[in-house]
């Protein structure tokens, strides 16, 4: 009897180990480790504390947006207007601060978040109530919000000298020795990790993306979930818009142009399904780190700018293939568990 129990425990350990090593996240961790070793061998500066700090700070804006895009992709949607929303919210708060130099920094960030929230809410309303296909709706709003950004700024920039010093100092400042942008990013991830995994609303997001018809039958208001998710995406765009102005000490009409492609790529690399219902916060962290490493490392190892986009594209394709293979392995392991 004891021998049989021992055999069952050994089989269970083998299955758990196999499922762990075949998961998307673990396979991406291995890829990241190999990538870092390769880059370090080519350039010893890469893994120095100062470069790692700069790399994480530069990747923080992308990482914040990636968590919002994950929620959008989980419900089976997409948002290609986020670059324009970032520019609009950043420009709006920059103009307010330019005209009101004594405004507190936190109020400037609040304005940016509210502008982004309103922009996202409108997009969600059009998609959910107007039943417009997400890619068409966000394509339209991408141009609308970009145009509004140029209009409210009268096709001009807000320069560094027009932005209050306390606002510009936020992204350069540190709390407990840690850069403020990194702290904001960590807080966003902790909040969303809890929200997605442990709240009823988070489970509704997964349910809508997995099977919208079943979700509707179970009593989930799909329209409200969609509006909420796009509003959250907009609020995060507003936060990034405010941070963007603080970090780069200027607001321009073409800010964050094309940024949405990197965000979607980070989610895809992290294992978020474009068809909805699958994805984890940890995977998005890894996807954002991967792109952040590439953006930092490719110039360090003297890769031509003409090749950098091509290399990113190849890595995205490889990540999709890897995700497909590991997902099949996970499905097989789950099937074996049920049979046992």
Image: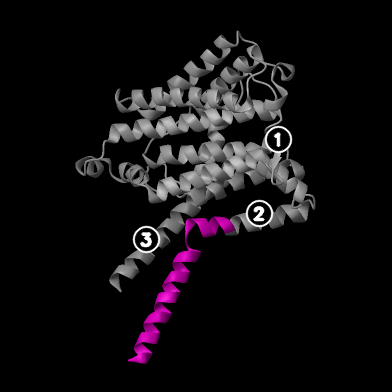
Mark nearer the viewer, 3 or 1: 3
The residue located at (52%, 27%) in the rendering is: 113
Discs 2, 3 touching: Cβ within 8 Å: no
SS assignment at label 2:
helix
SS assignment at label 3:
helix
Q: Is residue 125 above or below residue 180?
A: above
What label does residue 331 carry, if any?
3
On the image, which quarter does residue 328 sit in? bottom left
How far separated are the C-alphas under marks 3 and 1?
40 Å
Q: Is residue 233 above or below residue 175?
A: above
Question: In this figure, which residue is indicated by the disc labeled 1?
Answer: 305
Q: Residue furthest top?
A: 154
What label does residue 35 carry, if any?
2
Q: Residues within 10 Å of mark 2 (few under 14, many from 20)?
A: some
**First reached walking from the N terminus: tag 1 or tag 2:** 2
SS assignment at label 1:
helix
Q: Position of residue 84 (x, y in %)?
A: 53, 23
Q: Residues within 10 Å of mark 1 (few under 14, many from 20)?
A: few
**First reached walking from the N terminus: tag 2 or tag 3:** 2
């Amino acid at each position: 009897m004891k021998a049989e129990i021992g055999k069952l425990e050994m089989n269970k350990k083998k299955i758990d180990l196999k499922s762990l090593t075949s998961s998307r996240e673990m396979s991406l961790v291995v890829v990241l480790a190999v990538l870092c070793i390769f880059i370090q061998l080519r350039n010893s500066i890469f893994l120095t504390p100062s470069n790692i700090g700069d790399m994480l700070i530069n990747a923080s804006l992308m990482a914040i947006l990636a968590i919002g895009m994950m929620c959008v992709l989980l419900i089976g949607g997409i948002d290609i207007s986020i670059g324009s929303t970032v520019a609009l919210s950043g420009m709006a708060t920059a103009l307010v601060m330019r005209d009101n130099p004594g405004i507190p920094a936190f109020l400037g960030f609040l304005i940016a978040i509210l502008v982004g929230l309103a922009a996202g809410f409108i997009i969600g309303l059009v998609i959910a109530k107007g039943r417009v296909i997400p890619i068409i709706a966000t394509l339209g709003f991408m141009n609308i919000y970009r145009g509004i950004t140029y209009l409210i700024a009268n096709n001009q920039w807000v320069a560094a000298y027009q932005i209050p010093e306390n606002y510009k100092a936020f992204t350069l400042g540190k709390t407990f020795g840690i850069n403020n942008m990194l702290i904001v990013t960590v807080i966003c991830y902790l909040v969303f990790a809890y929200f997605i995994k442990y709240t009823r609303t988070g489970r509704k997001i997964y349910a809508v993306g997995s099977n919208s018809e079943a979700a509707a039958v179970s009593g989930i208001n799909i329209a409200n979930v969609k509006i909420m998710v796009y509003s959250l995406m907009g609020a995060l765009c507003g936060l990034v818009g405010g941070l963007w102005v603080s970090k780069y000490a200027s607001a321009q009409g073409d800010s964050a142009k094309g940024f949405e492609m990197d965000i979607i790529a980070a989610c895809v690399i992290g294992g978020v399904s474009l068809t909805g219902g699958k994805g984890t916060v940890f995977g998005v962290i890894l996807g954002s780190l991967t792109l952040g490493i590439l953006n930092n490392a490719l110039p360090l190892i003297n890769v031509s700018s003409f090749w950098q986009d091509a290399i990113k594209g190849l890595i995205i394709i490889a990540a999709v293939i890897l995700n497909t293979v590991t997902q099949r392995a996970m499905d097989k392991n789950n099937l074996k568990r049920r049979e046992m």
